[in-house]
Amino acid sequence: MKIALGVTGGISAYKAAELVREFQQRGLDVQVILTAHGQEFIRPLTFAALTGQKVITGMFGSGPQEANVESAIEHIAVAQTIDLLVIAPATANCLGKLANGVADDFLTTLYLATTAPVVVAPAMNVNMWEHPATRENVERLRRRGVHIVEPEAGYLACGMTGPGRLAAVEAIVEKVLDVLGIRQDLKNEVVLVTAGPTREEIDPVRYISNRSSGKMGYAIAEASYRRGARTVLVSGPTALRPPDGVVHIPVVSGAEMRDAVLERLPEATVVVKAAAVADYRPVKRSAQKIRSKAKELTLTLEPTEDILAEVGRRKGDRIVVGFAAETPAEIEDLLTSARTKLESKCLDLIVANDVSQEGNGFDSDSNTVLLLGRNGLQRQLPRLKKMDVANEILNEVASLRAHGRS
Ligand SMILES: Cc1cc2nc3c(=O)[nH]c(=O)nc-3n(C[C@H](O)[C@H](O)[C@H](O)COP(=O)(O)O)c2cc1C
């Protein structure tokens, strides 16, 4: 989704930089519009660097030689492509112009030209906020359906105390997500996700591992954070960048993953175990590189820790989701082994997939999964992008919570 962020000439304009980051971390594309007076408080370059996009600073370019059709109708183009306009901070001056339909710069013209919902977070000196003119303007905007994020009371930059301080960044973000209809249904949860493969060392240069890319677990962590959960991602070695906003704990072996998971478990309310932990490790790790001699080499393997079973034993009120990646001869085999795992590991939900199918499972960007729940749920999903699969899994988690499985 794309939003426009209008920044006006108030002392708290610097906080808009943090807002941009928060919006981006929730997957929103942000076009910043800075008023002429806003530029007295913060430079366009700050926003250009954060968003990687041109910042709109005026209606008319810098001179006649710059005039072209593209920039001349930019306010209409932006007005038609945004899903929401948020103005933070909004000065008393800006509120007055919005309330009265004055359109003397890009931001106020955009306000008139767009049909997208508008969120306004005012910030000003307490007397300005309490002035009858401002009160009338705010009420008029509210009646028109503009969402107002009320300023906070407190010590103001001008030295006075009272209402007028820009609302907390989280409150503004929450309102924007709410108006956009982006679910924040996991905001009371702490979601612990494991992802990627583990590596079990044979010697200093060799290891046993598997083909897991980590994409499924990373998608779940990203989706979970976007839906408001505090999210911890314990990940084996992958080539992926951890999603913004997520606490990332890198591990290598199954034993390290177990320790990290058990350390973080007490705070977690939901556990999603998407990692492909190696099932076996060498009984003995050679301290030196094993020399190649042209004869057979036998490695004795022992099972690694069963992290899922350990989490199951300490389950408490948590919702626990496991994965079963199989290469079944028949679909019935997949069902049977997934059901067995669901029961034996005390899971609430299991995500079963046939990784032998083309375009499925490891290292793929899509997945075709079957969701099985302890509550009798059985849902075969079509082939979906991993981010969509992640959201389907989290829908089931949210629904388990809503229906009292807490
Ligand atoms: C140091 C300083 C701080 C200001 N802070 C605010 C403020 O927090 N809120 C406000 O409404 N106006 C504030 N103003 C006044 C606005 O900058 C002024 O009304 C300006 O015309 C707003 O322009 P704009 O709404 O087009 O950005 C401040 C002015 C100065 C010089």
Image (cartoon, rainbow, N blue to C red):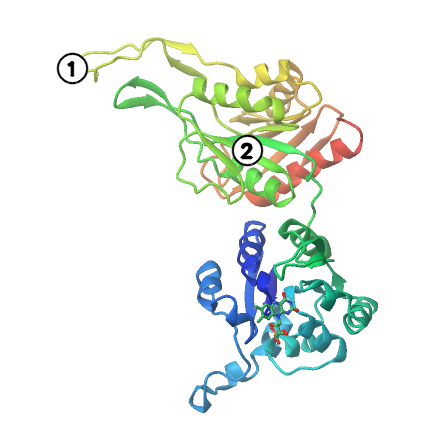
Quadrant location of residue 4? bottom right
Q: Which residue lies furthest to the front in this view?
A: 159
Crowding near the residue tagged with mark 1, few <14, some 14–19, many ≥20 C-alpha atoms within 10 Å: few
Image position, residue 214 (x, y; %): 47, 35
Label of residue 222 in the image:
none
Q: Name the amino acid, label 1.
A: Ala
Secondary structure under the numbered disc 1 in the rendered image = loop
Quadrant (top left, top right, bottom left, bottom right) of the C terminus: top right
Residue drawn at the location 80% of the way across and 32% of the way down: 403
Q: Name the residue under label 1.
A: 294
Q: In the drawing, does residue 221 fall left or right of residue 257?
A: right
On the rendering, which quadrant does ligand 1 occupy? bottom right
Q: Name the residue under label 2.
A: 232
- Kindly report which numbered mark, 2 or 1, lies closer to the viewer in this rendering: 2
Quadrant location of residue 292? top left
Q: Is mark 1 within 8 Å of ligand 1?
A: no
In the displayed structure, 4 sits above or below 285; it is: below
In the displayed structure, 165 sits above or below 339; it is: below
Q: In the drawing, does residue 221 fall left or right of residue 253?
A: right
Secondary structure under the numbered disc 2 in the rendered image = strand
Residue drawn at the location 76% of the way across and 66% of the way down: 146
Q: Nearer the viewer, residue 88 or 212?
A: 88
Q: Nearer the viewer, residue 10 or 142?
A: 10
Quadrant location of residue 328? top right
